[in-house]
Structure formats: structure tokens, C-alpha cells
Image: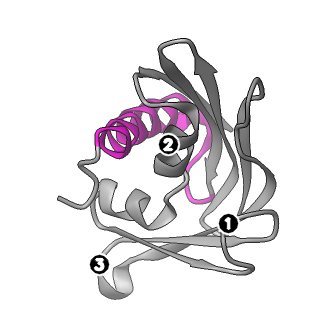
Amino acid sequence: MSTFRIGRVTALPATECWLKVTDWPAHGAAVPMTAVTVSGPGPSGVGTLVVARSGAGRFGFDDPMEIVEWEPPSAGRRGRCRLEKRGRVITGWAEIEVHGTDSGSVVLWVEELRLALLPRLLDRLVARAGRQVFARALDELLNGRAGR
């Protein structure tokens, strides 16, 4: 599996940062050629299904993910969300943590993914590409540019 890690420091308070990084439709706006739909008990929480549709027309694929852990940040406690990837094309998981600091917050994003059609020999390349795509998406989410 390909694993990558992204970290960002922001002046946003932890609760605002959490809302931005768990705004699933905005993730779709931040990743090229991707749309995200959400279903399940609303607002997001354990059991919510998030589906990222990537590609164009019939040349796309779905990346269904289920939220299996959901702990929004509160006074003195980090926020943590874990999604399990349940697709045929992409499997793995993603974890997003938000830690409050005196001057804002820190976001940690760790993702492990496996592309079904690629040999494990390409795991490092997949991790590098994933890190670049999701680092850009995280920057757009935190700076309010997703969807522009």
C-alpha cells in the first residue's frame, strides 16, 4: 500500500479548521475532475458514506468511503476522523486530525491507498502523486479557495 502524510499549520481555530477539512463536497471542488456526494445520517459522523467520483463520464470511477471514527475537536482534545475506503478501484483508509494550538491549529492528514490495477512496484509513485494532489486540496480547503 502507498502511504503518505501531510501536515499544515493554520491560524484558524480548531473548530473552524475541522469544519473546513471535513466539508466533503468542498473536497470534490478542491480535487480536479472530482465530485463528492454524502449520504447517511446527517451531519457527518460514524456511518456517513462519502463517495468521490473521479474522471469524466463513463471513464470515471467511484471511491466510496465510510466514516468509521468521528471525534470533532473540543477544549483540550484533538479532532479525529477516519474513513475506510470501500471501493473496487481504490482501497485503504484516510485519517484527518486537527490539534488546537495557542495560535490556531495543526492539521495532520495520513492516507494509505491501493489502486487495484497498479502493481505494488508503483506504490512510491502513487504515494508521491497522492501527497501532491491532497496537499493542494488541503491548502485550498484551509484557505477557502475550494470550488473557485
Q: Quadrant of residue 45?
A: bottom right
Earlier-in-chain disc, 1 versus 3: 1
Image side of residue 70 versus residue 49, left or right: right
Residue receiving disc 2? 16
Earlier-in-chain disc, 1 versus 2: 2
Residue at image coords 37%, 87%: 58
Q: Report the disc number at residue 144.
A: none
Image side of residue 140 versus residue 91, left or right: left
Residue receiving disc 3? 56
Pick out the residue farthest to the left.
148
Secondary structure mostly seen in the magenta stretch: helix
User: Is 113 part of what is drawn in magenta?
Assistant: no
For discs 1 and 3, the disc positioned in front in the rendered view: 1
How far across and how far down the image is residue 145, in percent?
A: 23, 49
Please tell me whether residue 61 is drawn above or below residue 82 in the rendered image: below
Using the numbered discs, state the Cα–Cα distance from disc 1 to disc 3 in whole angstroms. 27 Å
